[in-house]
Image (cartoon, rainbow, N blue to C red):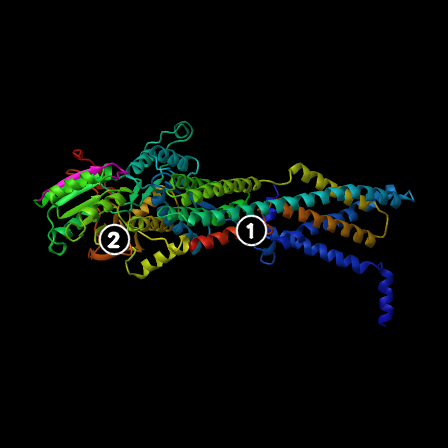
């Protein structure tokens, strides 16, 4: 008798029983939602869960963004940021996010020092990717190794010394426990280029004139070149230095003309190159008669030079944008996609890019960003397939095994590769003919100093 | 304190806030009703009295909520205008700079590109977290250096340079206003008053003497509407936070334009 049962139920419960039951169900559903939010294992209520933010590891980037070096160092900063973005996007480390903390050295040595201090004390970074000029690098190294701030001396033990990753080719004659150098040393860049031109394939050029900016890098590099030439029974036919930013090259060109060289080794840095190349073209129109071999003119510098004045001259680097390999094509494409289709890549940019990836590789192996652990991993000789080819960290000197390449400037402001070393070249920051008694092996005691070299 | 709510999608947040208000209202009805009835049921005109009080109170509270919602919307709208103005000034600056001679043109375009990329990829996500992005300032200083280093050589360049400097100053002003609005929000004390007001409204509904089901419906509707209003104000309150926040699309458009310059 269904009707009788219904009547009985209707008498037993109030009329609004079903509505109350519905409300109770709604409350239970809602509470389940809220409780589900708090549970890590919740799958059904993920839509309500606040997004999880992975812990961050700060990576210091210290370059000039303003001042005379601002434009040059912008490219390095971009290469480093590109590498960090790539690592984050790769999903290789889902539990952490790498955050770039960028500081501006303003092309001033004192500010590089202060910003390095900020990165160490306030941002608490374990690594700094940065610097361009040797003076800035030395200021940062000094700050890392000899902390002077009141904060460090008065408040916390000065135990934490972050690593510095330096991406530029430089003069050598330096090695520090907490510094890794990813640019070429003279024996990987200048000396192989000299060898090429001394040889038959380079035209047996024995009369070399040394021209550079008046600061540390050109003077030390030329000191090494002079010693190297002595070793081969030769001598530079002339040597001249001009201040940074110099524009009037009339007297310099007179000196070159008087010395009658057949090769000009150019270590001028910065915008002076524009004025020098223009003046040189007027005096020596044929690059085959007196070629310039530059060590600081890359694709980025060429965009400021009229193509006709630079065409036919040479530059020595480890990387050129025109290297025709899939890895390099991919690198160039990434840079253009990220920072503009008119961007060019050059050797310092490639070194800035690969140094971040090498740090990442060390981090992956060490499972920690602590400087001591990263250094220990790097000292195992990590290799990386860079856009310029395979590179390897040298555990002894904290430099990089790299290839040497010689490029000839084309009308489109790129380089034709005219020579490439058969294999990578081991770095030697202290060539024995220039720095007798100096050795460096961080796996066995570190740096052994010899008599100080007589560099002017 | 309650900034975590901006990490929740808007639809979910609406359900969460509205549901919390309704649940609170219903629980109060079940728990408080028996207690209040023993005291208040003795008066036959209790519903008229509470109804009168609720309507009076509701007017003031409704005014408060309404004004707050309008203020939050106006603030949101004015920040949106600031962002649009900033983006259009930047776009004009890009046009001016594009007419400079080389190599200044390329250097300035690259610096502006660097800045715009930073705004889109780093500054906007930081603003979404309520942080004032700082690194853009350095890039603006770099651009300013390049701009003032340029020496016009022709009358045409002089006019162009003066216009670029004017646009740059306008841009800096709009940018500063945007950065100021990152941390602008309704003060905590006002939120406290709003929440206490909501509690008092709901508590007044608990005092009605009526059938349980009617009581739950009445309280539920009122609480749901208040929850929705508070969700609306909260969503509009911080213009750069949450799903309803101001988009970086105008800057993304400029970045696309700059990439091809």
Quadrant of residue B48 in the image?
top right
Where are the magenta residues, as a range? A234-247
C-alpha separation, residue under disc 2 versus residue under disc 1:
47 Å
Q: In this view of the protein, which residue sits in the foreground, B1 or B96?
A: B96
Determine whether the residue tagged by mark 1 lies in a helix, strand or loop: loop
Task: Tell which subunit mark 2 falls on.
Answer: A
User: Where residue A308 is drawn, which disc sits there?
Assistant: 2
Identity of the residue furthest to the right in this view: B44
Q: Residue at x 71, y 54 (%)?
A: A27
Q: Is residue A344 visible?
A: yes
Local crowd size for mark 2, using a 10 Å CA cut-off: few (<14), some (14–19), many (≥20): some
Q: In this view of the protein, which residue sits in the foreground, B114 or B189?
A: B114
Task: Tell which subunit mark 1 falls on.
Answer: B
Instruction: Report x, y in % for residue A258.
Output: 12, 41
Determine whether the residue tagged by mark 2 lies in a helix, strand or loop: helix
Q: Main secondary structure of the magenta part?
A: loop
Instruction: Report x, y in % for residue B70.
Output: 69, 45
B80 left or right, relative to A79: right
Instruction: Report x, y in % for residue A239.
Output: 16, 39
Q: Identify the residue position indicated by label 1 in the image.
A: B247
Identity of the residue furthest to the left in this view: A233
Instruction: Report x, y in % for residue A65.
Output: 39, 41
B193 left or right, relative to B5: right
State whether discs 2 and 1 lie on one chain.
Answer: no
Local crowd size for mark 1, using a 10 Å CA cut-off: few (<14), some (14–19), many (≥20): some
Let me know if residue A128 is in the magenta part.
no
Q: Quadrant of the N terminus of chain B?
A: top right
Q: In this view of the protein, which residue sits in the foreground, B11 or A261?
A: A261
**Which callout, 2 or 1, points to the residue nearer the camera?**
2
């Amino acid at each position: 008798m269904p009707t009788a049962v219904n009547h009985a139920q209707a008498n037993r419960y109030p009329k609004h029983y079903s509505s109350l039951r519905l409300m109770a169900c709604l409350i239970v559903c809602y509470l389940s939602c809220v409780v589900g939010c708090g549970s890590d294992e919740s799958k059904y209520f993920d839509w309500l869960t606040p997004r999880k933010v992975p812990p961050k590891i700060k990576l210091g980037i210290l370059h000039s963004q303003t001042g005379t070096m601002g434009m040059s160092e912008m490219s390095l900063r971009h290469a480093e940021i590109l590498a960090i973005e790539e690592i984050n996007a790769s999903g290789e480390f889902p539990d952490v996010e790498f955050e770039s903390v960028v500081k501006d050295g303003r092309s001033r040595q004192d500010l590089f020092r202060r910003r390095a201090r900020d990165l160490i004390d306030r941002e608490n970074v374990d690594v700094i990717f940065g610097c361009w000029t040797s003076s800035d690098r030395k200021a940062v190294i000094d700050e890392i190794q000899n902390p002077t701030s009141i904060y460090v001396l008065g408040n916390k033990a000065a135990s934490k010394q972050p690593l510095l990753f330096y991406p530029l080719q430089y003069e050598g004659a330096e090695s520090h426990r907490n510094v890794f150098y990813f640019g070429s040393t003279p024996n990987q860049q200048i000396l192989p280029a000299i060898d090429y031109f001394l040889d038959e394939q380079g035209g047996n050029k024995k009369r070399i004139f040394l021209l550079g900016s008046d600061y540390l890098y050109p003077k030390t590099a030329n000191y090494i070149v002079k010693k190297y030439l002595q070793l081969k029974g030769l001598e530079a036919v002339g040597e001249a230095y001009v201040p940074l930013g110099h524009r009037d090259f009339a007297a310099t060109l007179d000196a070159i003309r008087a010395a009658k060289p057949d090769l000009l080794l150019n270590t001028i840095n910065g915008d002076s190159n524009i004025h020098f190349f223009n003046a040189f073209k007027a005096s020596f129109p044929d690059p085959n008669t007196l070629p310039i071999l530059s060590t600081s003119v890359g694709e980025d510098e060429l965009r400021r030079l009229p193509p006709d004045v630079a065409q036919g001259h040479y530059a020595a680097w480890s990387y050129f944008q025109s290297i025709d390999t899939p890895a390099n094509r991919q690198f160039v494409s990434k840079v253009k996609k990220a920072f503009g289709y008119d961007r060019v890549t050059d050797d310092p940019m490639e070194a800035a890019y690969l140094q971040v990836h090498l740090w990442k590789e060390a981090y992956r192996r060490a499972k920690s960003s602590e400087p001591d652990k990263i250094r220990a991993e790097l000292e195992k000789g990590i290799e990386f397939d860079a856009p310029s080819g395979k590179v390897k960290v040298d555990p002894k000197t904290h430099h990089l095994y790299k290839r040497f390449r010689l490029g000839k400037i084309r009308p489109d402001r790129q380089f034709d590769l005219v020579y490439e070393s058969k294999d990578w070249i081991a770095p030697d920051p202290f060539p024995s003919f220039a720095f007798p008694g100096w050795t460096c092996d961080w796996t066995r005691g570190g740096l052994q100093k010899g008599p100080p070299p007589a560099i002017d | 304190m309650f900034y975590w709510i901006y990490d929740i999608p808007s639809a979910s947040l609406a359900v969460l806030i509205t549901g919390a208000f309704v649940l609170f209202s219903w629980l109060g009805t079940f728990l408080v009703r028996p207690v209040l009835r023993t005291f208040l049921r003795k008066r036959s005109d209790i519903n008229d009295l509470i109804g009168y009080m609720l309507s009076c109170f509701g007017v003031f509270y409704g005014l408060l909520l309404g004004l707050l919602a309008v203020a939050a919307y106006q603030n949101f709208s004015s920040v949106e205008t600031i962002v649009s103005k900033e983006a259009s000034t930047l776009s004009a600056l890009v046009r001016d700079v594009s007419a400079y001679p080389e190599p200044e043109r390329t250097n300035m375009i690259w610096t502006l590109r660097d800045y715009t990329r930073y705004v889109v990829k780093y500054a906007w996500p930081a603003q979404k977290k309520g942080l004032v992005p700082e690194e853009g300032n350095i890039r603006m200083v770099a651009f300013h250096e390049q701009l003032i280093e340029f020496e016009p050589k022709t009358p045409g360049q002089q006019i162009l340079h003066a216009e670029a400097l004017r646009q740059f100053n306008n841009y800096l002003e709009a940018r500063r206003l945007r950065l100021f609005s990152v941390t602008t929000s309704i003060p905590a004390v006002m939120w406290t008053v709003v929440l206490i007001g909501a509690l008092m409204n709901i508590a007044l509904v608990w005092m009605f003497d009526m059938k349980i089901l009617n009581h739950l419906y009445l309280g539920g509707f009122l609480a749901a509407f208040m929850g929705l209003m508070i969700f609306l104000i909260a969503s509009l309150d911080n213009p750069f936070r949450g799903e309803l926040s101001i988009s970086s699309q105008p800057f993304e458009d400029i970045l696309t334009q700059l990439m091809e310059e």
